[in-house]
Image: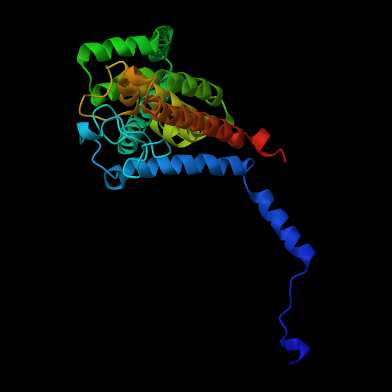
């Protein structure tokens, strides 16, 4: 075999240079970002496919199997990995099914409050007039109230229902979006590209949707990401107090409430859903912090 038939190998220096170049192109903090996305991915998969993933019917009661220990405790079995509750229901199945409720709350409340608050903030910041002071006084009044206590009062008056929780939280979470978007629009309305669009005859709707909205998207997305933990904790807290999801709905907050009387002898009945709530809320906050740093041009350019 001639030397021309032998495939050339890339020098070690070239391989290292390509590897360093690839690493530099990755976003800053990508190892932690991978962990965040993995946790969120598991949560989303469990929420979407909960009915197919659960090993047991989460509502099936069996008093014979009540209060079984988790698999690592003496007396635990592989049939019920995380044990059973006071009614013999499989804790692991209920934990997976509860993720469906939390996912439903997130994908309805955050987009709903985001759209409502962004629309009000755009109109208030661009059109001004009487609508601006009216909207901002409404925002100030709403932010002055203890939101959770007021939401608890309304939920208690309307009765426990997941639909009521969604509507109440949307009506309470739109205000930060409106205030943020209005402040951004006030700083953008006199910029050259906006003045040029107005000079060329663009109407208000075109200016707000095509010139102002794209410039406030980053801030709105960051706030939405940070609100994930707020929504999860608010829904779980309302359910814990009996004013959240209805009796037919499984949620992590209700699981914590159902296991609190057995905390001394079966701490995992409250520990598993409580840790799940804590981890997901923490990951939501950390992901929001990472996204804020990544979308900031000054921090993004720091090597």
Residue 222 shows in this picture: no
Judged left or right of residue 218, residue 267 is left
Residue located 57% across and 28% down the image: 191
- Within the image, what quadrant is residue 170 found in? top left
Give the position of the C terminus as an image quadrant: top right
Residue at 45 percent across and 26 percent down: it is 229
Query: Where does the N terminus fall, quadrant-wise?
Result: bottom right
Q: Nearer the viewer, residue 238 or 72?
A: 72
Residue 245 seen in the figure = yes
Q: Position of residue 223 (x, y in %)?
A: 48, 27
> Which residue extends farthest front?
74
Q: Work out whether residue 250 or residue 3 is closer to the camera in this orientation and state it.
A: 250
Where residue 302 appears, x then y in whole percent? Answer: 71, 38
In the rendered view, would you say 122 is above or below 291?
A: above
Question: Which of the 4 image quadrants contains residue 86?
Answer: top left
Q: Position of residue 64 (x, y in %)?
A: 21, 34
Is 147 positioned to the left or the right of 162 in the image? right
């Amino acid at each position: 075999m001639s030397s021309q038939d032998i495939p050339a190998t890339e020098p070690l220096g070239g391989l290292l240079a390509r590897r360093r170049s690839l690493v530099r192109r990755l976003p800053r903090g990508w190892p932690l970002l991978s962990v965040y996305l993995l946790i969120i991915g598991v949560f989303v998969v469990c929420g979407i496919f909960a009915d197919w993933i659960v090993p047991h019917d989460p509502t099936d009661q069996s008093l014979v199997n009540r209060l079984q220990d988790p698999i690592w405790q003496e007396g635990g079995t592989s049939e019920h990995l995380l044990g059973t509750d006071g009614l013999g229901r499989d804790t692991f199945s209920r934990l997976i099914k509860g993720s469906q409720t939390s996912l439903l709350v997130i994908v309805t409340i955050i987009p709903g409050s985001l759209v409502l608050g962004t629309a009000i903030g755009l109109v208030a910041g661009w059109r001004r007039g009487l609508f601006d002071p009216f909207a901002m006084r409404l925002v100030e009044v709403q932010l002055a109230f203890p939101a959770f206590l007021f939401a608890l009062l309304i939920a208690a008056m309307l009765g426990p229902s997941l639909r009521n929780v969604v509507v109440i939280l949307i009506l309470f979470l739109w205000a930060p979006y409106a205030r943020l978007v209005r402040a951004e629009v006030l700083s953008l309305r006199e910029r050259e590209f906006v003045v040029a669009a107005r000079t060329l005859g663009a109407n208000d709707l075109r200016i707000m949707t095509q010139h102002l909205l794209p410039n406030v998207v980053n801030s709105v997305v960051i706030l939405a990401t940070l609100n994930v933990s707020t929504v999860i904790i608010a829904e779980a807290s309302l359910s814990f107090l009996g004013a959240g999801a209805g009796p037919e709905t499984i949620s992590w907050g209700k699981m914590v409430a159902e296991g609190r009387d057995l905390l001394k002898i079966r701490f995992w009945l409250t520990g598993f859903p409580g840790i799940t709530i804590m981890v997901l809320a923490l990951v939501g906050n950390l992901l929001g912090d990472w996204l804020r740093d990544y979308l900031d041009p000054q921090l993004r350019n720091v090597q």
